[in-house]
Image (tube, rainbow, N blue to C red):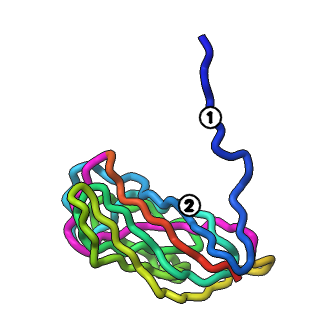
C-alpha cells in the first residue's frame, strides 16, 4: 500500500530587511474545551514558542476566533517562557517573568461572520531589538493569551494569531 506524503516546505522561514515578516500562526497550548474564562484568566497552560526577527517594528496583528466568541484578548510577547499556568485561572507572572515582556497586543472590536470572528490590531508601530546580531536572524520568543472578557472556547476551534513585523 503506497502512502502519499505532501511536503509543504523544506526551507526554514526567512526574514528580509525592509519587508513584512508574518509570525505565526500562534495557537495557545493547553486550552480546555468548554472552559468559561473570566476577565484576566490564563488561556492555556504554557507559552507558545514563535519565531520573530531579532529586530523590527510590530506593525499589526490578526486574531481569528473560530469559536465565535468576540471577546477581548491580550497576547503577551515575552523573551523567555513563563511558568506553567492554570488554564481558566488567573494569569500569574512573577516580577522576573514580567521583566521579559516585549509587548502586549490587545484585541477587541471583532468583525462577526456568523460562524467565527476576526479582530485586528493595526498601526501598532512598536520597535524592538532583542540582543546583538543581524536584525534578520529569527529568534524564539514566547506568546501567551489572556482573556479580557468572558470567552468560552469550543474545541477544536482554537483562537489563532498572526503578527506582521517590519524587519529592521
Q: Which residue is mark 2?
A: 49
Q: Helix, strand, or loop for circle 2? A: strand
Residue at image point 56% right, 61% down? 49
Q: Which is nearer the eye, 38 or 8?
A: 8
Q: Is the residue 154 above or below the residue 2 in the image?
A: below
Asked whether the viewer can see residue 158, the reply is: yes
Looking at the rendering, in which quadrant would you find the N terminus?
Answer: top right
Residue 26 on image: x %, y %: 48, 61
Picture residue at 61% right of the left edge, 25% below the top: 4
Residues rendered magenta in the picture: 136-155
The residue where tag 1 is placed is 6
| Rendering coords of residue 159 (x, y %) | 36, 59
Q: Give the mark count.
A: 2
Task: Determine the residue located farthest toward the right in the rendered image.
Answer: 133
- Up/down of 148 relative to 157, above or below: below
Residue 51 in the image, given as x and y percentages of width and height: 62, 64
Within 10 Å of the Cα at label 2, are there few (<14), some (14-19), or many (20+) other Cα atoms?
many
Q: Is residue 122 magenta?
A: no
Image quarter (top left, top right, bottom left or bottom right) of the C terminus: bottom right
The residue depicted at 51 percent of the width and 74 percent of the height is: 77
Residue 165 is drawn in which quadrant? bottom right
Label 2 to label 1: alpha-carbon separation: 25 Å
Q: Nearer the viewer, residue 128 or 100?
A: 128
Q: Residues within 10 Å of mark 1 (few under 14, many from 20)?
A: few
| Residue 13 found in image quarter | bottom right
Label 1 element class: loop
The disc label shown at residue 96, or none = none
- Report whether residue 40 is seen: no
Of 43 and 112, the residue lying toward us: 112
Disc nearest the viewer among 2 and 1: 1
Amino acid at each position: 500500500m503506497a502512502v502519499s506524503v505532501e511536503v509543504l516546505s523544506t526551507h526554514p522561514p526567512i526574514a528580509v530587511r525592509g519587508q513584512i515578516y508574518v509570525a505565526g500562526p500562534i495557537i495557545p497550548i493547553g486550552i480546555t474545551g468548554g472552559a468559561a474564562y473570566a476577565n484576566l484568566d490564563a488561556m492555556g497552560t504554557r507559552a507558545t514558542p514563535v519565531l520573530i526577527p531579532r529586530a523590527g517594528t510590530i506593525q499589526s496583528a490578526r486574531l481569528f476566533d473560530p469559536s465565535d466568541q468576540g471577546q477581548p484578548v491580550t497576547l503577551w510577547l515575552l523573551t523567555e517562557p513563563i511558568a506553567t499556568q492554570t488554564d481558566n485561572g488567573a494569569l500569574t507572572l512573577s516580577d522576573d517573568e514580567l521583566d521579559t515582556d516585549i509587548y502586549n497586543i490587545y484585541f477587541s472590536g471583532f468583525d462577526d461572520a456568523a460562524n467565527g470572528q476576526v479582530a485586528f490590531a493595526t498601526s501598532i508601530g512598536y520597535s524592538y531589538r532583542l540582543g546583538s546580531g543581524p536584525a534578520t536572524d529569527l529568534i524564539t520568543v514566547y506568546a501567551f493569551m489572556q482573556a479580557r472578557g468572558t470567552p468560552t472556547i469550543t474545541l477544536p476551534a482554537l483562537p489563532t494569531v498572526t503578527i506582521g513585523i517590519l524587519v529592521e
